[in-house]
Image (spheres, rainbow, N blue to C red):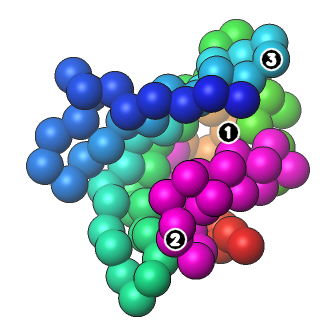
Amino acid sequence: MDYRLLDDGSEGLVATLVIDLPGATIIVMGELEDRDGGLVVDRVHISTSPVGAGALTRRVMAVIAARILEDTGYDWIIVRGAARTTGARPGHIPREFRFP
């Protein structure tokens, strides 16, 4: 797994991360906040390529988070999704995820 910050998709508090996995690319955009040894990523939007349900499972998210925690030195990450714009239940705000 490789990841990189997308400079032209990041401004102010908003960061865009491109994550390359075997067989898929995931783009994550959200507002970052350092808090008490951890990182809160708020109002997150996610795009996957190829498009399809199941490309980003809880297990895959845990692997990505573990790598980011290891590389950055944060103790934890909280990911809070934004209201869905497409797919199942537009307008729905998904529950937050905490890693580890």
Q: Would you name the residue on which mark 2 appears?
A: 74
Residue 11 on the magenta span: no
Which residue range is magenta in the image? 59-84
Q: Is residue 76 magenta?
A: yes
Q: Quadrant of residue 95?
A: bottom right
Q: Mark 2 and mark 1 in contact (Cβ < 8 Å)?
A: no
Q: Amino acid at mark 1?
A: Ala
Amino acid at pointer 3: Pro
Quadrant, the N terminus: top right
Quarter holding the C terminus is bottom right
Determine whether the residue tagged by mark 2 lies in a helix, strand or loop. loop
Tell me the residue that label 1 is attached to: 88
Disc 1 element = loop
**Earlier along the polypeptide chain: callout 3 or callout 1?**
3
Q: Image point 31% across, 69% down: which residue?
A: 33
Dot placed on the residue nearer the N-terminal end, 2 or 3: 3
Neighbours of disc 1 within 10 Å: few (<14), some (14-19), many (20+): few
Where is residue 58 shown, x and y percent of the image?
Answer: 81, 52
